[in-house]
Each structure stands twice: as structure tokens, then as C-alpha cells.
Amino acid sequence: MGTHTDHFKCIVTALFLVVGFSLPSAAQESGLDQLYQELQEADPATSSRVERQIITEWEKSGSAAMDLLLRRGKDALEDGEPDVAVEHFSALVDHAPDFAEGYYGRASSYYLMGMTGPALDDIRQVLALNPRHFAAMGGLALIMEELGRNDDALALYRMILEINPNASDAQMATDRLELELEGQSL
């Protein structure tokens, strides 16, 4: 049990270092910067539209073949076949190792299959490639909560809110965890 805890501590520490040191260089991405700025300034009614636009940009690999693998993996997930999805996402990762969405899809698939370790490895890679990937941060926060690492989960939810102040799920989780952690410190 101790080695698993140590392993997760290392992953979380590495994640925060990667995200922390990568944010300034990620700010140089001109294509998404405008959308992230709009997300910061959006009201709750328009933020979901901007979120969808950002996700659409994330999903553009620049290759029709890679886009097809992504679509097949997402379709398999929607059909409740994460094992099939892993195959498509793994092929995508093999052929496009710098495309974060391949890792994100595979992380989601691994998680659904109960394979937390591989899911964490892929989430780490997503965030190394795309430090503002609020969906991957949300997935990691969920895993941290399941592991009883509520302080880490809370920090991740707060990072999501820095990117998207209108992320209602992250706000509800933040409020809930703050209350839980406050109650534990009494």
C-alpha cells in the first residue's frame, strides 16, 4: 500500500511541477489564447459554448487519419466499449505522440476499465502536452478524491476555476471539499 501512495504522491507532484512550469510557455499558443480569454470573461450562459469551441480545437490533430482514430475511440467509449476504445487511442498515441487528445481518450478508457495507474500516466502526459486541459484536470481531481487525497483534488478544482471561472462542477466540488476539509480540521 505504501508504494502505491508514494507513486501517487510522485505523480501529483510531477503534475503540479509540469503544469506550473508549463503555463507561461502554453500562454504562447496563439490559436487557443483568444478562446481561453473569452472563457475567462464569459458569463455562465456563454461559457459552455466557449468550452465546446476549445474542446473542438483540442480535437484537431491536423491529420484525417488521426481524426478518424480519435472519432473511433470516442465512439467506442460512447458505446460502452472502453477496451475497444483503448485500442483506437493507443494507435492514435503511437502515430501522433504529441497529440494530447489521444492520451486523454485512452486515460478515460483506462479509468472506465478500473486501471487507475495507466489512466494517471496518460493524464500526466495530457497535461504535459496541454497544461490548460481542464477536462484532464477534472479527471485527475476525481481520481484524487477516490484515493482520499482531497487536498490534491481541491487544488486541481481550483486550477480548473482559474481557467474557467464558470465551471459549475468544479465550483460545486470546491465548495464541497472546502467544507469537508474544514470539518476535518476542527
Image (tube, rainbow, N blue to C red):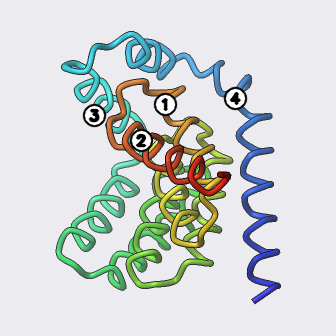
Number of labels in the image equals 4
Mark 2 neighbour density, 10 Å: few (under 14) some (14–19) many (20 or more): many
* Element assignment for label 2: helix
Q: Is residue 19 left or right of residue 143?
A: right
Residue occupying the point 79% across, 54% down: 14
The residue beneath circle 3 is: 52
Circles 1 and 2 in contact, beta carbons < 8 Å: yes
The residue beneath circle 1 is: 161
Image depth: mark 2 or mark 4 in front:
2
Q: Amino acid at mark 1?
A: Leu
Query: Which circle marks residue 100 in the picture?
Result: none
Q: Position of residue 122 (x, y in %)?
A: 59, 65
Query: If you read the primary sequence from the N terminus, does the residue marked by circle 3 or circle 2 appear first?
Result: 3
Q: Position of residue 121 (x, y in %)?
A: 65, 68
**Which residue occupies the foreground of this view, 175 or 108?**
175
In the rendered view, tell whether residue 171 sits above or below residue 125.
Answer: above
How far is mark 1 from mark 2, CA to CA?
7 Å
In the rendered view, tell whether residue 143 sits above or below residue 184.
Answer: below
